Amino acid sequence: MSNEPSNTSGIISKVWSYCNTLRDDGVGYGDYLEQLTYLLFLKMADEFSRPPHNRKLPIPKEYNWESLTAKRGAELESHYTTLLRELSHSKAILGQIFIKSQNKIQDPAKLFKLIDMIDKEQWTMMGTDVKGKIYEGLLEKNAEDTKSGAGQYFTPRPLIKAMVACVQPQPMKSIADPACGTGGFFLAAYDYISDSKNFTLTKEQKEFLKNSSFYGNEIVAGARRLALMNMFLHNIGDIDSETFILPTDSLVADTGLRVDYVLTNPPFGKKSSMTFTNEEGEQEKEGLTYNRQDFWATTSNKQLNFVQHIRTLLKTSGKAAVVLPDNVLFEGGAGETVRKKILETTDLHTILRLPTGIFYAQGVKANVLFFDNKPASKDPWTSEVWIYDYRTNIRHTLKKSPLKFEDLEEFIECYNSTNRHKRKETWHPESNPEGRWRKFTYEEIVSRDKTSLDITWLKDKSLADLDNLPDPDVLANDIIENLEAGIESFKEIVVTINGK
């Protein structure tokens, strides 16, 4: 940050304070983020078209940045609305950013003020960390806005950073996220590979990292738009390059893509479904199953489908780190089939049990599964599964006690990326029964009911020690989370029963 202009914090506070001004007009974080995305993209394109860059870009003159700065009042509002509509028909990243775009700032004076604020800065000269800080900050604020539902596309950044620190992606390797949300895993992998403490990149490696490393899917247009802009601001991809985040449902088919790493947090909610209108004109939901030759089990459980798809995506030497809810660890039927196959065909070596209170979606109990793909073999590839229990007796809340990267440093140390086969348990039945790091053999796991990977051994102290109960607000939050998780499960049952 030392090379950054001294007005860095001024720019950040300006962008933030204007967000609050617009909130008074009913423009939420999500809407503000979208308008900021459109305008920033046009301003940066304008800067790229001038010296020293002098690039020819596919933005028609009548819809470029200058066409906006020259107008005021009702004429500006009308022109901006037309511009958004016309640019949505463009090709490459330009079209993907402006697809389904709408003007949400109805007051022309406030729209002009926002354009003027963006116009005063040279964004291409600004460090990627500054632009990233502004944008990632707004993405997180948007995720906190529970009414918008944006939290489901936002994985806590400390968790992503810890997953990347364990996997340690290498230069000149491909990285996929089949449900990429706003692009958090891509950014963390990019930061790790471009960090001079980890690698000294050659020109070829830098070029590959910028233009050829990442492959994503995101079916929600708004989230995909934010992801593309987030990448662009962090110097990933280019203003006139083809998009590497596809709008298609990654589960529909095996496209033949094979990658070195998959880092992902598939959307929560068990059922895959599609909505259609029945003969009475009513909206109905129908369970969506994917009939794929490469899947071991046909199911409408979205997470189990993602596990199967991720295994297909990996090269035979590929590695995956995936955030998955508890049901994937214990559910019978298709769940048991998928677990057995993952244990046989890959080396499922590590599970990190996550605490509640770290996701913006309420009531989520999740884990990170780390597995390495392997060539075909008659013997199972998994010999032992190491489990780190960072859930029992751990309390996090989004506001008062959010998850920090430091909280996961002990896990990263135990994971021992440099030599995974020299791991040491911290658990011991006599000397340390409270140890959080424990291994289980393949034989122990397959002998469990339904090959369940939902394994705990630590005593929940809050239940045993009535004199040291957590604060009332923590208890209340735990109760709310459990109730909401239960309600979600019942809603899914009702949807299944009624088909609505």
Image: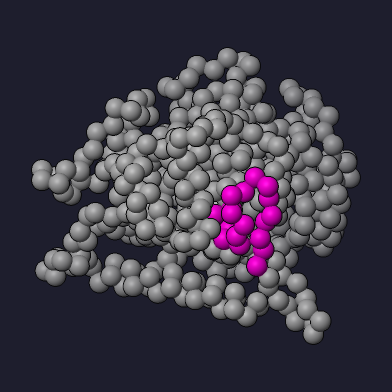
The residue sitting at the bottom extreme is 280
Closer-to-camera residue (104/99): 99
- Examine the rendered structure and indicate whether residue 266 appears above or below residue 378: below
- Examine the rendered structure and indicate whether residue 338 appears above or below residue 20: above
- Which quadrant of the structure image shows residue 76? bottom right
Closer-to-camera residue (335/425): 335
Q: Is residue 300 magenta?
A: yes
Q: Main secondary structure of the magenta part?
A: loop
Q: Which quarter of the figure is the C terminus placed in?
A: bottom right
Across and down, in percent, residue 389 comes to: 30, 50
Q: Is any atom of residue 359 visible in this view? A: no
Q: Name the side, left or right, on which 276 lies relative to 463.
A: right
Across and down, in percent, residue 438 comes to: 26, 43
Q: Name the side, left or right, on which 48 lies relative to 216.
A: right
Residue sitting at 69 percent across and 55 percent down?
A: 291
Across and down, in percent, residue 160 comes to: 46, 43
Residue sitting at 34 percent across and 51 percent down?
A: 447
Span of residues in magenta: 287-305
Residue sitting at 83 percent across and 29 percent down?
A: 56
